[in-house]
Amino acid sequence: MLPRVTILAAFLLGVLVLPVAAATPPSPVTIKTQISFASMPFSGTFTVTEGAAAVACSGGTFFDAPRSMGVIEKHFTCTAGSGAGDSFVVLFHPRSRGVPGPGVANGPWSVLSGTGDFADLHGTGDFSVVVTGPASGEETFQGAVHFD
């Protein structure tokens, strides 16, 4: 029978040499959307204007899904970049006034979930919505993202 100290040392060595996945450092990201308010669910296209390499996506499509009073899920599907075909969901809280930006609605956002290349995506930031036509607008999501 092995002494307890030997067993404990072997256990600790086993734990200490296990590979640990390192998280990527936070990278700045800016996502701009062209959104149609013509029918529900609101939908449109997006372009990653800053951080496309870090996110592995430069653009795609999206639709909004109201979650609860004052909270919306935005479902992004990447169509350009190595993450093409995968998706991520951003949760945001529109407010009629506040920071950031000049928009008719502003507020915080955070990554809720993702699939495929975006399964370990995390991030937060601020967004702003500017009306550009009778049933259209442009949203700007700025912040930082990282992968675990």
Image (cartoon, helix red, strand yellow):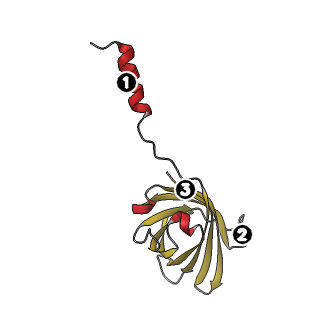
Give the Cα separation between the discs numbered 1 and 2.
56 Å
Residue kind at label 3, given as amino acid type: His
Count of marks placed on residues: 3
The one nearer the camera, 74 or 121, is 121
- Is residue 82 in view? yes
The one nearer the camera, 6 or 66, is 6
Residue kind at label 2, given as amino acid type: Gly
Disc 3 crowd, CA 10 A, few/some/many (<14, 14-19, 20+)? some
Q: Which residue is mark 3?
A: 146
Q: Earlier in the sequence, mark 1 or mark 3?
A: 1
Residue 101: which numbered mark, if any? 2
Where residue 37 sits in the image (x, y, percent)?
Answer: 54, 81
Where residue 130 sits in the image (x, y, percent)?
Answer: 66, 77
The label nearer to you, 1 versus 2, is: 1
Q: Identify the residue shown where x is 37% and y is 24%.
A: 10
Residue 10: which numbered mark, if any? 1
The label nearer to you, 3 versus 2, is: 3
Give the Cα separation between the discs numbered 3 and 2.
24 Å
Disc 2 crowd, CA 10 A, few/some/many (<14, 14-19, 20+)? some
